[in-house]
Structures are given as structure tokens and as C-alpha cells.
Amino acid sequence: MTLTTPAVRVARLGVRFGDRVALHAVEFDVAPGEFVALAGPNGSGKTTLLRALLGFLNPDEGAVELFGAPVADLSIRERARRVAWVPQEESLRDDVRLSQYVLYGRYPHLRPMDRETETDRALVARILGEVGLADRANDGILSISGGERQRAILARALAQRTPLLLLDEPTSHLDIAHQLDLLGRVHALSRNEGVTVIAALHDLNLAARYADRIIVLSRGRRIADGPPRSVLSEDLLARVWGVDAELAVDSRSGLPYLLPRRLVTETRPSSSTLTAGPVHVVGGGGAGAPLLRGLIDEGFRVTAGALHLLDTDAEAAESLGVVAAVEGPFAPLSPATRAHHRALLSEARVIVVAAFAVGPSNLANLEDVLPYATRTPVVVVDQTPGTPIDFAEGRATAAREALRTAGATFVPDTDSAIREVVRVLAGPRADPSLLTPEG
């Protein structure tokens, strides 16, 4: 048996966000050409782990190596030549042609001042054909559907021609046919071209179908690691996801698959094994981050908005895998962002308003909550005495008082807000329809 340098080495990796431990002593190797699926409930650390592999965040403990080199020692261009990234969501601002967007994947291979070649363009055309977007090559990236956009993001990553491919929930916007198609293509890259693949997947049955190995995370810890046949079990789904399931085996492939039956509420009443919600957090400037982390730790599905790019809360939402309405840095909230924010508000079972600083650019956040306050429980964190948060000439204070008049519950701090959400959604009288399995 020959010794081979791992494509990825994760050594005792630890990541914290304030008091919250996102990853705890996570350790594993991935061999070149291996397809590894990351599985686990929301908030288990999958996205944080992927961001650490990319070098997007610095761990508090441990290290990551890509093909024998510490990721922290690699320049951005060197990283881009080793690893391609398919995020769960991508904020796109410019409506560039699809062919130009995919061509961005070739830039790590160009020297400064070089332009793409006909060979690069031919490669892009071929990849667009492979992902079923050849007829949309001249359309704007913002004009296509969410599912088509996810395939375009994959196409850009494929154009990088890297030995490592990382994917964060790549099938989240795709119908079942395109889910199978996308994962089939990624599996073929691993099998036929030796590309190493690490993909965060919610669907355990898809993970079992395509991955060589499944790593299960729970509350930032690696609790299972191995081939699908040894990892998937009824006990695993009950312990980690709080779901009672039947384990079966596909007679044609011999692969295991799980048939969920019901929540294990009789023996696992803790909210940490259930996902209620979604709970929508309105914040900004770091005021919402403790709420996002605390609510996820309690097992709630969480959304956020509207937030500005580069804002502390926006970075926390991204690192936690929280769906958020996001606006450009320092810009007033656009009609499109407000529409996205209202859509998240309309889906929320509880809305939590942080004690965030409000100015003209984000006043609309408070104003957009008010129409929902008469039919959705709203929890408002009161401002700390002596800490001003109204920088909108009194309009923010008026908006918060309008929420009080509409029936919102005001609480003194973040912990009280989380307890109130638990009381509303996970208490003994909670509507069972609000409780759904994680994953």
C-alpha cells in the first residue's frame, strides 16, 4: 500500500463565534478522488467547516491542509487553483451574460493582464452544454431561475478545473431530476477524473447514493464517519435529527436508504432535536448575531434580514447557513431586497427584533415588520438604557412603539428573547404543525 498525501487534512479543528462553539476538535482526512458528504442538522457546523477548508475564516484551534499545504499559507490565486467552491446562496449584483459568468472560473489560471483564450471560451461553451444551459449562454445571470442559477454556479466551478470541489447544499434549489443530474455529474468527476469532492447535503438518501463516505456533524462535533452502509442507521437519525425512521436496502444497488416516519417526541422532548419555525431575526451591526446563534442552538430554523453586505450580522448569517435578505454595503434597502425581506417575514412563525441601530438606510426593516405583527408573534429586544439606537430622527422609536401597540412582546435582553421564542414554539402547548424534522 503506497502512502498518498491527503487531498484534505483537518487536524483538531476548532472554531468559535463569541461564546458559541461552532466546531470542536474536528479531525479527518480525505483521499484524492474521494467523494465525501457532510451531513447534520441545521447549525451543526457544515458550512463553517467548508468555510474553514476554503480559508475564509481562521480557526481558533487546529489546522487545515490542502494537498499537503496549510490553507493559511496559500494565496487567494493558489487556493483558487486547488479548490472550486459552489455556495448555497450567492449574492449577484451585475446581470452579466451567463457565458461571461462561467468564464470567471478561468481567471485563476490567467496571468495578470492576460485575457481569456479561444480555448477558455470553448471550454465554457462545452460546460454550459453539460449542465443544460447552452441555450441560455447569452442571457443575464439575474434573469434565469434559481435552479438554473445553481447550475451556472456549478458550471463556473467546473471551469476552474481544480482537483478539489467543495459544495454547500448544491441541490437546495433544484427539482429532483436536476438534483440527480447535478450529483451524477459531480460523482463522474470524482470517478473518472479523480476530482476530490466534499459536499454538504441535507438529503441522507442522496448522500448514500453518490458519496463514498458520509461524515455526520452534530453541534460542531464529528459523531459518525464511514461508508454509507456503516453510517446510515435508524439510531443515527433518532439521536441526531430526532426522527424515527425505517432503514431499508435498495435491492438493485445494495445501498441503504431511510424512510422517515415521525418525530421521536416521546423519548426526545428537547427542542435541540426539533426544528420549529422558521424564526425570523431582524437586526444589524452585530445585534442580531447572538440571537441567530442562540436560536440555532435551541434547534430552530432561522432566517434573517434585511442585512447589508460586510455587516457583522450578515457575516454571522452566512457562516451559520442562515437564509437572509441582503443588500449592498451602506445602501438604502432596494425594492427587491425589501420584497425578499417581506417574503421571509410572511413565512416566519415568530419574528424577533434585535436592539439594532436604525438609520435612514435600514429604517424600512422596522416598518416592514409592522404589517405582520397583528398575525405573527413579535418579540422585541429593548434597547439598553443609555445606548442610543435611533439615528432616524425619532422614526425608529415610533416604529418600535407601533410594534408595542400592535401586541409585540418586549424583553430586556437576548436570552429573554430566546426563552420567549421557546415558550411560543416549543412549549407544551405548541402547535404540532410548527414542529418539523431537521435536515
Image (cartoon, rainbow, N blue to C red):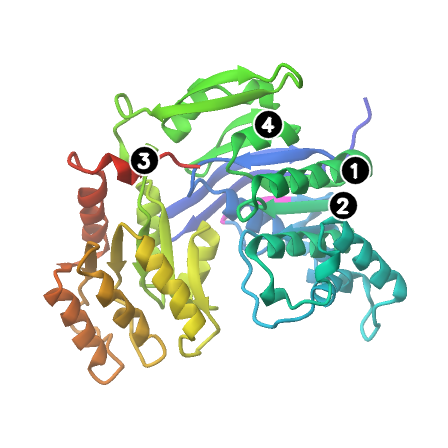
Q: Which of marks 3 and 4 is in front?
A: 4
Kindly indicate the quadrant of the structure image that contains residue 434. Answer: top left
Tag of residue 276: none
Residue 286 in percent (x, y) is at: 35, 64
Q: Which of marks 4 and 1 is in front?
A: 4
Q: Is 414 left or right of 197, judged from the image as shown?
A: left
Say which label, 3 or 4, has the lower sequence index. 4
- SS for tag 4? helix
Residue located beneath label 3 in the image = 272
Q: Nearer the viewer, residue 133 or 123?
A: 133
Q: Do the residues labelled 2 and 3 touch (CB within 8 Å)?
A: no
Q: Nearer the viewer, residue 168 or 432?
A: 432
Q: Are marks 2 and 4 in contact (CB under 8 Å)?
A: no
Q: Are marks 1 and 2 in contact (CB under 8 Å)?
A: yes
Q: Does the magenta stretch include residue 294?
A: no
Say which label, 3 or 1, has the lower sequence index. 1
Per the model, the C-alpha gap separating discs 4 and 1 is 19 Å
Q: Name the residue rendered at 36%, 57% in the picture.
A: 344
Amino acid type, label 1: Gly
Q: Do the residues labelled 3 and 1 touch (CB within 8 Å)?
A: no
Q: Is 382 left or right of 273, judged from the image as shown?
A: left
Per the model, the C-alpha gap separating discs 3 and 4 is 25 Å
Residue located beneath label 4 in the image = 208
Circle 4: is it few (<14), some (14-19), or many (20+) Cα within 10 Å?
A: many
Q: Which of 291 and 409 is in front in this view?
A: 409
Taking the view exactly as shown, the residue that stands out farthest to the bottom is: 393
Say which label, 1 or 2, has the lower sequence index. 2
Amino acid type, label 3: Ser
Please determine whether, in this image, residue 148 is positioned above or below residue 121.
above
Circle 2: is it few (<14), some (14-19), or many (20+) Cα within 10 Å?
A: many
Amino acid type, label 2: Pro
